[in-house]
Amino acid sequence: MTTHVLVPIDGSAQANAALVRAAEIFPEATITLLYVADPDDDGLSGLSASKRYERRYEDVERLFAHARGQVPANGPTIETAVRSGSAWRRIVTYAEEEGVDHVVVGSHGRDGASRLLLGSVAELVVRRAPVPVTVVK
């Protein structure tokens, strides 16, 4: 049975580092790249609904293509998924519903007041995920 690893991505250096680390730790796994879209924060509010969807689709496809380029061709199998909503909730829900064996998530390394105000997706995933979680800085 192949190990199923979930790596949430958002285009950040930390998410890319998490993907590279996941590929190193689980070279024979199936890695699902999960992008969680925040429908309230797309920066495209001036566009029509169809144009927003088209632009977001193009952006996410570029993000996935870039991420695939971070993984060796003879490395893990890469799959992709997109969900909408609260990042940590969608990550945890995906892990629960899709038979994920492990989550590898990047941490932005916030601390102090910024972490208290903004919360930490990685921290919430660690606390709530039904499977082991590796946090990569």
Image: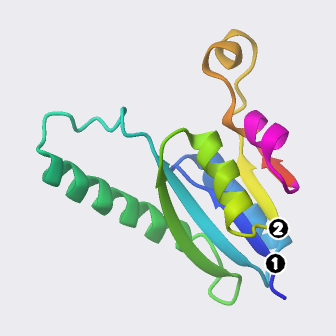
Q: Is residue 127 magenta?
A: yes
| Residue 23 seen in the figure | no
| Residue 77 seen in the figure | yes
Quarter in which the N terminus is drawn: bottom right
User: To which residue does mark 1 refer?
Assistant: 3
Residue at 37% x, 33% y: name it: 41
- Predominant SS of the magenta segment: helix
State the mark number for residue 85.
none
Q: Where is residue 107 in the image (x, y as percent from the top left)?
A: 71, 40
Q: Where is residue 119 in the image (x, y as percent from the top left)?
A: 67, 23
Quarter holding residue 131: bottom right
Residue at 67% x, 36% y: name it: 121
Gap between marks 2 and 1 measured at Cα: 6 Å
Give the farthest residue toward the top: 113
Quarter in which the C terminus is drawn: top right
Q: Where is residue 20 in the image (x, y as percent from the top left)?
A: 70, 64
Stretch of the chain drawn in magenta: 123-132
Give the farthest residue toward the right: 132
* Horizontal arrangement in the rendering, residue 114 relative to residue 55 (left or right): right
User: To which residue does mark 2 refer?
Assistant: 101
Disc 1 residue type?
Thr
Give the farthest residue toward the front: 97
Q: Is residue 44 magenta?
A: no
**Toward the viewer: 86 or 114?**
86
Q: Where is residue 70 in the image (x, y as percent from the top left)?
A: 60, 69
Against 56, residue 39 (above or below) is above
Disc 2 residue type?
Asp
Against 66, residue 108 (above or below) is above
